[in-house]
Image: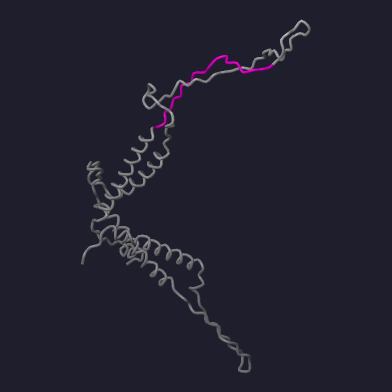
Amino acid sequence: MAKRKLYQHIITESDVKNGAEKIKAETLKVFKGRDLFEGLHKEYLPKDASGDMLPTEEKEVVTTVAERLAWTEEKLVDLFDFELTKDATNMSAKADLEVDGHVIATGVPVTFLLSLEKRLTEIRNCYDAIPTIDMSKKWEEGGRKGIRKFGPVEQYRTAKKTVAVTLAPATDKHPAQVKAETEDVQIGKFMTTYYSGASHPKEKADLLSRVDRLIEATKRARMKANEVEVTEQNIGKGIFEFINGK
C-alpha cells in the first residue's frame, strides 16, 4: 500500500482538530452538568395494605465517566498521533528554494517555507505602498542617491498698486478728469526646485515583480517538500495508558 504524502496528511488536519475540540468541549459541558451521570429508583411502600399506592419514580444513568472518557480518548488519540506524525515528517520535508534558475538556498525545511511565504506576502504589501514620482514632470538626479529634482520653476510675485488713469485731458476750461485704479504689478519672482525621494514607477514594478516570483518559487518549494512520504507516528495510546494507570 502506497504511503501517504505530507500534503495528503495535512489536508485532514482541520477535520481531526475540529473533531477533537468538539468532543473535548462536549465532555467538559457534560461533566459540569452532572445530570447524565445520576439516576434513581424511588418506590413508595404504604404502611399497610389499605394505604395509597404511588407510582415508582425511575431515572436511568445515561452515561458514566468511564464511557465518556473512553469516547473522548478515542478522538484525542487520533489528534496526538496526527500532530506527531505531521511534526516528525516535517523534520525531513525539505526542498531547494530556486528562482529564475538561481538557487537561493538548499534543503529548506517546509515549516520555514510556509513561514517565508507569509512573510513575503507581508513584504509585498509594504512594497505595493511605495510612493512614486509624478511622471508628468521631467525629473533629474538630485545629487543624492534616491533623490530626484524638478525645476527651477518660475512663479511671479505681484502686488496691487494704485495708478492714476486719465479719463479726459485738461483743457483751458476744465481740469483733467482722473480716476484712481488698482492693477497687479510684478515685483519679483520665486524660483522653486522640487525634490522627491519617491520611486520611479518602473523601479516599483520591478521590485514587485521580483517579490512575486519569489513568492511563487516559495510555493513551489513548499509543495515539493510536502511530497515527502508521511512518517507514521503513534503516541496517543501510550499517553492515555499512563493517565489511566495501565
Q: Nearer the viewer, residue 102 or 110?
A: 102
Q: For residue 63, what is the image quadrant?
A: bottom left
Looking at this view, name the residue that lies furthest to the left. Answer: 1
Q: Position of residue 151 (x, y in %)?
A: 44, 22
Relative to 154, 207 lies left or right: left
Rendered image quadrant of residue 236: bottom left
> Which quadrant of the figure contains the C terminus?
bottom left
Count of residue discs: 0
> As drawn, is 34 to the left or to the right of 183?
left
**Outermost residue, front direction?**
172
Could you tell me which residue is drawn at 32 percent across and 49 percent down? 114
Q: Nearer the viewer, residue 81 or 140?
A: 140
In front of the other: 24 or 208: 208
- Relative placement, left or right, of 188 versus 239 is right
Percent of width and height locating residue 164: 69, 12
Above or below, 12 relative to 53: above
Query: Of 134 and 39, which appears nearest the observer?
Result: 134
x 33%, y 44%: residue: 212
Residue extending farthest top: 172
Q: Position of residue 176 (x, y in %)?
A: 74, 9
Q: In the picture shown, does residue 120 fall above or below 150?
A: below
**Residue 30 placement (x, y as % from top left):** 48, 68
Per the picture, the main secondary structure of the magenta-coloured stretch is strand
Is residue 187 a member of the stretch shown in magenta?
Answer: yes
Which residue is drawn at the image coordinates 30% and 50% (left, top)? 219
127, above or below 86, in the image? above
Does 204 lie within the magenta span?
no
- The quarter of the picture where residue 79 lies is bottom left
In the displayed structure, does residue 184 sit left or right of residue 34?
right
Q: Residue at x 49, y 73 (%)?
A: 36
| Span colored in magenta | 181-199
Q: Quadrant of the N terminus?
A: bottom left
